[in-house]
Image (cartoon, rainbow, N blue to C red):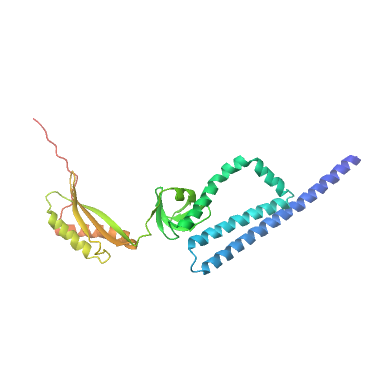
Amino acid sequence: MEKLNIIIDQLLGYGLSFGKSLLTAFVIYFVGIYIIKFANKMIKKALNKKKNIDPAVSSFVTSLVDVALKILLIIAVISALGIETTSFAALLASAGVAVGMALSGNLQNFAGGLMVLIFKPYRVGDYVEFGGIQGSVKEIKIFQTVLTTVDNKTIFVPNSAISSGTLTNYSTQPDRRVDWTFSVAYGTEYSVVKAKIEEIMLADVRIKKDPALFIALGALADSSVNITVRAWVSAADYWDVFFDMNKAVYEEFNKAGIEFPFPQLQVHTSK
């Protein structure tokens, strides 16, 4: 009976000690989360006040500080629970191969993020494409780049994929070339079509005079004569000019009696 009482007392002692440690760990965790949020907010606010700081650097630094503070918080919580950090480190070291494999992707993403900041292939606000994905760069974080697509979807792309792949940045050059192919029916006089297209295109002030507008007979297709048209515009006007010219050509061709082609098939029968 006496031994049982001793065991119960020991268990109660351990329980109270662990309860205190657990309560301390919870307090440290919740206070730490609040401090991290507050610190991130203040850092972001301070960086935003600096007008000469690239938004990409600002988002990357904020992300880096957030990760570092969370790692410190995890270590503090583990210490509060009574687990020696040296033992914890030894446990991680013993599983070094597995941990290394698990973190290799994140390390590559971190290195990719640094490469983006150093060489600046794109900046926050640029419209880019890689791996078949297109969108505007919203944030450059420590491990990933956040894109917003034209239909308002958010895409998270690993930085390692961006830094090691082929990237197209549509925002680096002030001007872009717009290409069209307008098809007309066989028998339509080419000079009439060319003159009408020139009239439509040159009436739009958004189309630049230099480089000059290019119009040529592109192909004699199965059911149509295809006219190739190329014009230079400001990058910001690209899609507006593209769609506006499609509409204008359709309306003006109908007014001028220029016939659009339909697929045709000749069938020869033998008697």
Kindly give the residue lying farthest to the left in the view shown: 271
Give the farthest residue toward the right.
2
Residue 128: tell me if it is visible. yes
- Out of 43 and 264, give the one closest to the viewer: 43
Q: Which residue lies furthest to the front in this view?
A: 118
| Viewer-proximal residue among 78 and 152 | 78
Q: Is residue 151 visible?
A: no
Residue at image location 71% in from the left, 47% down from the top: 86
Where in the figure is residue 157, as x and y percent of width and height?
47, 50
Decide: is 2 above or below 77.
Answer: above
| Left or right: 122, with 20 as reference point | left
Horizontally, residue 104 falls left or right of residue 127, namely right
User: In the image, what residue occupies the spot 66% across and 55% down?
Assistant: 73
Coordinates of residue 43 in the picture (x, y in percent):
57, 64
Q: Quadrant of residue 173?
A: bottom left
Q: Where is residue 56 in the image (x, y as percent from the top left)?
A: 48, 60
In the image, what residue occupies the spot 69% across and 44% down? Answer: 90
Q: Residue at x 91, y 41 (%)?
A: 2
| Quadrant of the image occupied by residue 152 | bottom left
Q: Is residue 133 left or right of residue 105?
A: left
Residue 196's place in the image compared with 185, above or below, is: below
In the displayed structure image, the side of residue 190 where residue 100 appears, left or right: right
- Counting from the top left corner in percent of width and height, residue 77 is at 69, 53
The quadrant the N terminus occupies is top right
Quarter of the image where the C terminus is located: top left
Q: How many tags in the picture?
A: 0
